[in-house]
Amino acid sequence: MIISDNLRFSYASLEDDAPLRPAIDGVCFSIGKGEFVAVVGRNGSGKSTLARHINALLSPTEGTMRVNGIDTKDETQIWEIRRIAGMVFQNPDNQIVASTVEEDTAFGPENMGVPSHEIRSRVDTALAAVDMLEHVKSAPHHLSGGQKQRVAIAGVLAMQPSIIIFDESTAMLDPSGRREVMRTIKDLHQKGHTIILITHFMEEAAQAERIIVMDHGRVALDGPPRDIFTRSDILTNIGLTVPQAVLLAQGLRETGLTVSNVLTAEELITEKSVIETAERFTYFDKLATVKTLLPLPQTDPLIKIHNLTHIYNPGAAYEKKAISDINLTIHKGEIIGIIGHTGSGKSTLIQHLNALLKPTSGQIIIDGEDIHADKKNLKNLRKRVGLVFQYPEHQLFESTVYKDVAFGPIHTGMPADKVDESVRRSLKIVGLSEETFEKSPFTLSGGQKRRAAIAGVLAMQPDILILDEPTAGLDPSGREEILAQIKKMHAELNVTVIIISHSMDDAARLCGRIIVMNQGQIALDGTPAEIFSQGPALEDFGLDVPHVTRIMAYLARINPVIPAGILTVEEAVRVLSASPVSKAFPSEASV
Amino acid sequence: MTRIIIGQYYPADSPIHRLDPRVKLLAVIAYVTVLIFVTNFYGLAVAALFLAGVIWLSRVSVRFVLRGLRVILFILSFAALINLLLTPGENVLFSFAFIRVTTEGIHRAAVMGARLVLLITGSSLLTLTTSPIQLTDGIEALLKPLRLPAHDIAIMMTIALRMIPTLAEELGKIMKAQKARGADFETGSPLKRIRNFLPILVPLFVSSFKRADELATAMEARCYRGGEGRTKLKPLGFTGRDALAGGVVVIFCVVLVLTRFI
């Protein structure tokens, strides 16, 4: 179906003297009809470039790409190739053309010149296939992220393609949106479509029949997920990770347990040896989960929120209560995670903390003072409470990185002689070297841009640092880097950190306390172990649980002595390998 | 931004909604043109009656239609006031300095005001009962005989309509983010205020170009190659109902012009 033969491709360089680094450097593979292939690799490894060769959006510099026997270089066949190989992109907002769902779904067939009555039936079939028939007349900007992506899929389906390429189509969605889209993808595969799924989420890749791992424009590994994930050494080396179930199985194998080559949580919990270990488990040393039993830090309350309610457009027909009656106390030095599905009120809540939004009713007290008591204090407040928005790199605007980072400190009234020191220190913490200081922020890589933007807030020297989905859209190694830097900021700069996250793993690993928002209210508030041991409740809120936690929760049902709130693979291995006689646990209270 | 009611589509299933957008466009053009020639209350009464009939048929809630007038309330009262105070005439009722209120003035202000209300309400009915897509389809069809790049204009309008809510949302987000970094858009001299907008404009332009680029790629991936050979999900169809509506509008226009001679 798809045959790539020694494919090479280089983007035209903007500067003449810059050496051309090929984005794709000799790629060979063939994909059969009806296969479900995941393509993984870090940012810049050539995944998207490769995908864009399959539907002739790009034409190879060398080598050939054949789709259904047609050479993609053949310009007379270009529209046929694009019909055969449909593509769903990352950002739902930037691929929906028309202002109603049905008109957008019709866009492809209209371009192909399909007769009107047939377009109608294709649109209805396609929307039914993605379960969006009830929204035919809706405007795209009224839909959720997951729904928009399903509309985009319908738009491709209406062209009746045999191949569908997903270019990081789940990257911008919340957990329930990701689940919706993944369910649709698997469904399409069942119906016989050839699926190519580009993703940064290894748990998604594990659901494919085959994984192609890209690195530096080449195919590093190619095979079934079961084989690919046994090569965790190679994967880690090229900046990727392995699903938690696979890691846990590996960890257990190292302790001497016979565990077969499992892929998912569901497989692991049906492993005979694992179940037997769980059943035998009688002894439990509390030290093993010492972290989860730590009390909340007994420091002074820093932020107190009283009965906070916010209503958007009060009095209008479309007024919306975003948050209602929130009461919350945040202590100095905490790292708090706020999780909740899109629209649960997380962003509204945090925008009150630096007075970007005014409460409809209620009070916010920071360090004993009502933040709205003194209007002149606004600048000081925004300096104290640093807020890093989602995709903060979109707010870069200055001619150099240095100037951009200096914008915040200068405008919040930092003395001129302190600005330089603060800017340099912040850039250093986020790991940007001196050479980048005088570069235009727009020439940096995606991950570097994000870090420069975070430095811009850090340079104001806030006491409280709020980050709205700091790792969204990054590849696994980019995510690790940002998380490590946030820990560093917390430790070195002594800031209180509040993080909004759609990644349950990040929240579980980083935060000492987690707040779950649902429908504008605080649904749960507690330690990660407490929160994530409530799997079913979280799923009701459109959230998820780290896979390892889910595995342990299942085993805890077999044998109630097993602690349920286990958050990391290391912890799980330690608990499960605890033999009845051994009492000496390594009392690592590591993070 | 979302408070502007003019131009907002009011989804419903009514005989007016179902009319061919071309007919509706031409009818509005005709309606506006003849309304300009109306000078007396008979004409206004006929137009008002006609409009009331159309509103009733369209099933758009009257409150919704009238809310559109709020936006022009200022212009409306200003125009009426000017006419009221500055119309020269014989029958002076009240005078102070250069201000003279005359019966002619009152008459003119009333006609003027009523005409404006009828004008705005009538044309907003077009957008209230016609979805943006039908509207662009209609404009495309009407422009075609004029040898204009009709399809290109139509697709530009479609994309603009689609992107306005997205960009408005984006603008709000960028403003907030820069405020969080201490940017101030409310104080300072005019020149300083303009400069203060750089932190908003640069990111907005950068992201708009990025969006445009991604949208173009997505459109190409879905086989978009201009207007040639394109078909439509809902092709415009001129039916008996449309002919009937056209006839009614023509009769209305003739009657309205005739009222001048009463």
Image: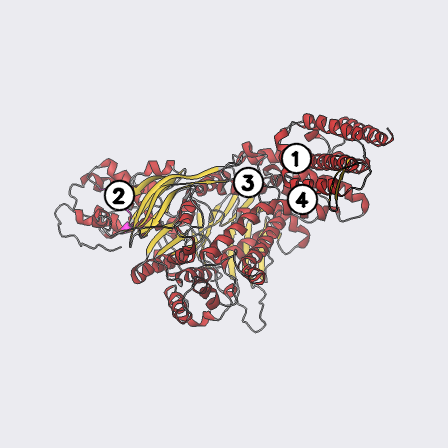
CA gap, disc 2 and disc 3: 37 Å
| Magenta highlight: main SS | loop
Label 1: few (<14), some (14–19) or many (≥20) C-alpha neighbours in 10 Å:
many
CA gap, disc 2 and disc 1: 55 Å
The residue nearer to you, when weighing A257 against B75, is B75
Residue wearing tag 2: A565
Between marks 2 and 4 in the image, the one whose residue lies nearer the viewer: 2
Whether callout 3 and callout 1 share a subunit is answered no
Picture layout, residue A299 above or below residue B248: below
Q: Position of residue B234 (x, y in %)?
A: 68, 35
Q: Which chain's residue wears label 2?
A: A
- Callout 3–callout 4 Cβ contact below 8 Å: no
Q: Which residues are magenta?
A: A563-569
Whichever of callouts 2 and 3 sits on the residue coming sooner in the sequence is: 3
Whichever of callouts 2 and 4 sits on the residue coming sooner in the sequence is: 4
CA gap, disc 3 and disc 1: 25 Å
Residue wearing tag 4: A111
CA gap, disc 2 and disc 4: 53 Å
**Residue occupying the point 62% across, 54% down:** A72
Residue type at tag 1: Leu
Residue wearing tag 1: B128
Between marks 4 and 1 in the image, the one whose residue lies nearer the viewer: 1
Residue type at tag 2: Gly
- Callout 2–callout 1 Cβ contact below 8 Å: no
